[in-house]
Amino acid sequence: MKVPLSWLRDFVEVELEVDELARVFDDLGLVVEGVQRFGEGLDGVVVARVSEITAIEGADRIRRVVVDAGDGEVEVVCGAWNFSEGDLVPLARVGAVLPGGFEISQRKMRGVLSNGMLCSGRELALSEDGEGILVLGEGAVVGTPLAEALGIAPDVVFDLAVEGNRPDALSIAGVARDLAARLGLDWSVPPLPAPLGDVAEASAEEGCLVKEGGETDVTIRVECPQLCDRFGAWVISGVAVAASPAWMQRRLSMAGMRPINNVVDVSNYLMVEIGQPNHPYDLARLSGRGLVVRVAEPGEKLVTLDGVERTLGLGYDSRPGPADCVIADAEGKVVGIAGVIGGASSEIAEGTCEVLLEVAHFDPMAVARTSRRLRIRTEAALRFERGCDPAAIETTGERFVRLLAAISPKGSRLSVTQVSTALGERPSPRRVLIRVPRVNAILGTDLKAEEVSAHLRSLGFVVDEDGADGGRGGSGQVGDSGEVLVVEVPTFRPDCEREIDLIEEVARIHGYSRIPRRALLVPRAGGLTAYQRERRKVRQVAALALGATEAWTPSFLAPGDHHRAGLAEPEVVVANPVAREESVLRSSLLPGLLAALSRNVSHRNADVILFEVGHVFERAKGSSPAVPDEREVLAVMCADASGSREGVMAAVRAWRVLEDALGLRGVEIRQEPVGGLHPGRAGRLISRGDEVGVLGEVHPAVAEAFGLPGRRIGWLEVALGWESSGGRSSEEGIGILSSVPRRPPEVREPSPYPSADLDLAFAVPEDVPAESVRRSIENALGSAGEWVVLFDVYRGAEIQPGSRSLAFRARVALPDRTLTDADLADLRARAIDAVERETRGRLRS
Amino acid sequence: MSERDDLLAEIEAVSGRLAAASPKSAQEARAIEKDLLSALAVIKKKLASLLPEERRHVGAALGEAQRKVIETVAELRGELEREEEARRLASEWVDLTEIVADPWPVGRLHLVTTTRDELEDVFVSLGFSVAEGPEAETDFYSFEALNIPRDHPARSMFDTLFLDVGGEELADPSQSPFLMRPHTSPVQIHLMEEQGPPIYAVMPGRTYRRETPDARHLATFHQIEGLVVDRTVTFGDLAGTIEVFTTAYFGTGVHSRLRPSYFPFTEPSAEFEITCTICSGKGCRTCSQTGWIELGGCGMVDPAVFAAVGIDPEEWSGFAFGFGIDRCAQMRHSIPDMRLLIANDVRFARQL
């Protein structure tokens, strides 16, 4: 919302400095996003009369112009063609600095010395018009400063961000009301827009305003009262379309609107000034004399004011459905989209002499839906969808006519008839109760009833202090804090429906900064949950023990990315993606991390270890549509340039480190093919029958597909589990931080007696996992075993094909005495027996 | 010469050899010692043939000579060993800075992770717990329960990514009941539904918007929100909490202020601003000369939100706030382009 200071001052006599004013706006929640100055930089610009225009030899774009600037003739070079000899124009003298900071200097062009510059409205920041030189009306005195000649004082425009709940502040009047309330100043609507200057005086004498007695053949019919509850219409004849006066053009320009002609400008002026959108039709260009408000037929078309053909009544899928409210002429042809934009066919144009003015109130939600779906964001739609004042229709219509009369060319006569057939009921103000103790309980203040009611009154609310507390008669005394105030909410504040809405207004006008701050005393200990603490540890282990760097890869991937990574394409996709490349909700971190690795490799960061903790998604099981299943997972990706087994070894090592660091128990590596991984170097991590992760080496074809040919890439992806306040099925709780058993809390005292080592080598068939042999030994040794490790693997001539030699070392000790040779022999025999019985391994002799 | 004198002379000769010995190394000293002691041992064997008195006399001399050999050699050897040790150590000198095991011995946590942890820690120290929730959500938890019904103009504040979970084809994507949460507020709803008051919690997490990323915004980003619900919680408590947090996280010179704003789920609502960390409040380009920069939004929980989760707003009151984790990281580390956070370039991470 662009608010020129001079316009604001029509409503409230504010005298603050610009900086100070900006602070007050901020404090009211009308955030100042910019401050723009207009009409400054006019020093050194004077009124001059064109006395001679001559061509410059060899130049067809510029001409030599001699002007009389009051103190003699000045020769300039000018590239504009919109003026002729005898016109009055603005001359920027040498040394003048224009509003854009451009300094005028003597320049020679095509051999002609230019001693200044003739300026356009835009160059002087007076209007948006940059097409030609600003040609001034007769009456200006040659040689006078331009600002003086135009009666222009420098102006300031505040660009305010108006929050969605404040439709009233989308107007000069509303902004002024807030300002007046905060500063304790009077607020009033100017009787007629000021300053009208001499133009208005002239028209007040010669133009006239005739009210007819309601005799008109124009009819208005509303077929959909649920979308349009009030429709005011005025027939204004005797209109002469012309340019609006400079002051109005200037205000509209400063407010960000383009001046068009007097009728359209008055319409826009009122929308900006009092916040009520309205629409003038050229009555002669409507078929039949009247309007119908109805729901659009599916597929109905309209060329709107911006020249675009719109198709109405169709949803996003082009199927009929949504109720677009439209205005049609008496013969049924659509001439406007209600509350959004008018049609081109009935646009006010040069020859218009009879105007049908529409000032209506439309359903905010309907306007919002239509404007969003058709992607038409207009100033009118913005105001309607937030909520216009339904009681302002009559005053807007009257003000329109008076304003148009005031600026109409001399001698024009307007006659006006109001069509009240569809006007509807004028709504009455809403009543809301506000409890003073409640105000203080919410805000933490100690406001008295008088203060609360004064704040509300300053915003135009009517407060009945004697209302609900009853029995106090007409004492007028505002009493103790137990009081309830009855508040009449004006119709221009649709946002204030409840007590809390009023409390916010009290707080806003009182000033947030004046509400005392209190240090919150939390009556409980804060902290992280065990899951959250352990997840931090997982990250530390990944970074510190594995040397991995944390990545953050996108949750949305391109179609085909999963497939490229050897995974099934997920079924859950974004319905309205920004780009196709970001439309598939990831089911694994693998594609994203491969892409991240690939980028690093392309920057020659080759030996990189990356990890990520993130959410992955899957279509919910079950037939009815549901929120996707979601899990939090850890993935580690180890890239190594060399070594034929580096990839898989790094992955297994990463798992072992994690397992040990977290004290995980009983997770089995079940070796089997896994999507995206090397078929012989992949497995699943199984805990009590549940899969908690996968690990292995990325399939060479997948690596190649991601631009990483020949790289051995280790991959580990494990579910951390699920702990959330939106937790759904218990199934989602599977993961290393939630479902996997941990190291027991009881500990065993280490044996004080000497230990011994048993070295055992077995010939074991290739399909028997080394881990199963190790576990056999471990179980067989029972409490005597301190640890059992695989320390050598050998394949060669002495071992029969299909087997390999696995050498284990077990450290044994007894808790209560020193081991004897007999003990050792016994333990050894038990271990061998167990392995041979349970695993098909054979002791090597 | 008597046998006794002969033996004494022999002992004298050994002593003479000891005096003359100048071993070059500890090893040579040990050889000399061995040599001289065995010479003395040979002499000792001859003592048997002496008279007892002579034997005592010569024996004493022999013992004295033995002791001298051991002592002297030990002394010589000690000196030599020290020299040798010094030589060896000198030869083992290394330049400590040429030892480079691994250029990057440990990995790095993501900047967003460390920032989130720090923020969590501040609130935990104030007595808050940390609550989390799913990133894929329903319309109810993301909008409806937060007082943003369908077609509410406030929905335009949240450019939302809606999900197609399969099944019937969607005519209008925005009518899908499933979506990626555009803020972490759904966690507040879950928390109020499941736990009920009193609540003192922050909700950090990843959020999504339908936007094209640029230097200042990412379409996927992280937020942390806070929710307090208890009896007699006021706007003054909210302002006090924001101030305590601001000073605790950004430093003692950094303060906060609130100014009116609008959110459908809070009322009264406010934006909170903090002292510009670039210019310390003096005014600069970053803060548009105001000395303040906007950090997030906050307000008192709207009674309509309480109604949606079945909490009696007459009995309980509460406040909520929220701001960007990534933005905090950006401010702390002067990150020129937010997209660096998702580039996953280890050269960026290794600077941290």
Image: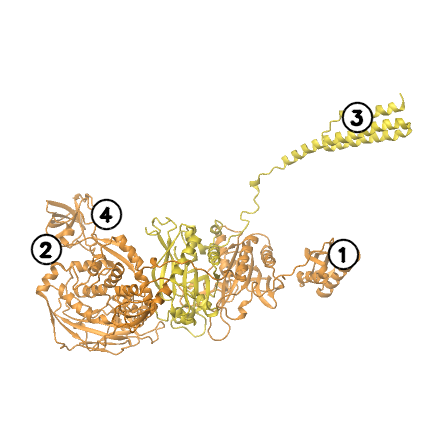
The chain coloured yellow carries which letter?
A: B
* Circle 1 Cα neighbour tier, 10 Å, few/some/many (<14 / 14–19 / ≥20): few
Query: Could you say whether the residue bearing mark 4 is in a helix, strand or loop?
Result: loop
Nearer to us of marks 2 and 3 is 3
Which residue is depicted at the point 15% across and 71% down?
Answer: A236
Visible in this render: residue A798? no
- Determine the chain carrying the residue at label 3: B
Query: Could you say whether the residue bearing mark 3 is in a helix, strand or loop?
Result: helix
Q: Position of residue B129 (x, y in %)?
A: 49, 61
Same subunit: marks 3 and 4: no
Picture quadrant of residue A263 = bottom left
Which residue was labeled with disc 3? B15
Q: Decide: is A225 above or below A385.
A: below
The chain coloured orange carries which letter?
A: A
Q: Position of residue B309 (x, y in %)?
A: 43, 71
Which residue was labeled with disc 1? A817
Q: Nearer the viewer, residue A735 or B126?
A: B126
Query: Could you say whether the residue bearing mark 2 is in a helix, strand or loop?
Result: loop
Image quarter (top left, top right, bottom left or bottom right) of the C terminus of chain A: bottom right
Same subunit: marks 2 and 1: yes
Give the alpha-carbon distance from disc 3 to disc 1, as whole Å. Answer: 56 Å
- The circle drawn on residue A635 is none
Which residue was labeled with disc 2? A138
Give the alpha-carbon distance from disc 2 to disc 1, as whole Å. Answer: 122 Å
Q: Amino acid at mark 4?
A: Phe
Same subunit: marks 4 and 1: yes
Query: Could you say whether the residue bearing mark 1 is in a helix, strand or loop?
Result: loop
Q: For this view, does B177 lie left or right of residue A277?
A: right
Which residue was labeled with disc 4? A102
Nearer-N-terminus badge (4/2):
4
